[in-house]
Image: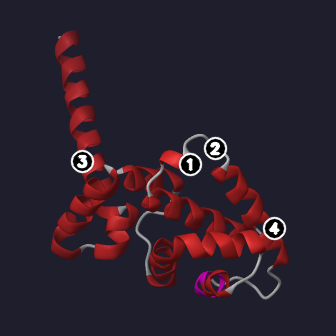
Amino acid sequence: MKTKLIALVMGVMIMTSSQISANMYKECGLGAIVFGDSMEGVPAAVSNVTWDLGTTASSSKSSGTCALSGNDMAAAIFIMETYPTLVIDAAKGEGAHLTTVFNLLGASQSRSSIVSNVQSQLLNAINTTEYSSQSRLEMSEALFVIINNSIKTI
């Protein structure tokens, strides 16, 4: 009896975790940002798995950036498309691309402390051993989280 109960609990846990994982690939990451919930999330899931084996989906799920919309979505797409130039702007502390992201994410007019925080966190991210092996999608998502969190906390 005890064995059957443990087997039942394990079965439910496996089914639940696979459902959560499937939803994560459909509802999170850049695939979800680009494709939304079109065709029940299938294009988002395919995109997430194809481009980075689902790492942006899992990291956005764990970081809380899942299911972006509106200006957040526009900012995430803009960061992905302009990543190299945006990193240079962030390092300089100014530039059209950085200003655009700040405007999309609703940063206040007093941006110097936000810029300092972004620069510090971005430098920390770039100096990790994982950075050089990350895909552009992963780098873009990390930069989105850095900028968005800096704006919200400062």
Which label's residue is closer to the chain start, 3 or 2?
3
Q: Which residue is mark 4?
A: 116
Q: Quadrant of the N terminus?
A: top left
Residue kind at label 3, given as amino acid type: Gln
The magenta segment: 101-105
Mark linked to residue 131? 1
Element carrying mark 4? helix
Q: Is residue 54 left or right of residue 6?
A: right
Q: Which image quadrant is residue 84 in?
A: bottom right
Dot 2 alpha-carbon crowd within 10 angstroms: few under 14, some 14 to 19, many 20 or more: few
Location of residue 105 in the rendering, given as x and y in whole percent from the top left corner: 60, 81
Location of residue 12 in the rendering, given as x and y in whole percent from the top left corner: 22, 34
Q: Which residue is mark 3?
A: 19
Q: Which image quadrant is residue 70 in?
A: bottom left
Image vertical order of residue 113 relative to residue 133, above or below: below
Q: Which residue is mark 2?
A: 128
Residue kind at label 1, given as amino acid type: Tyr
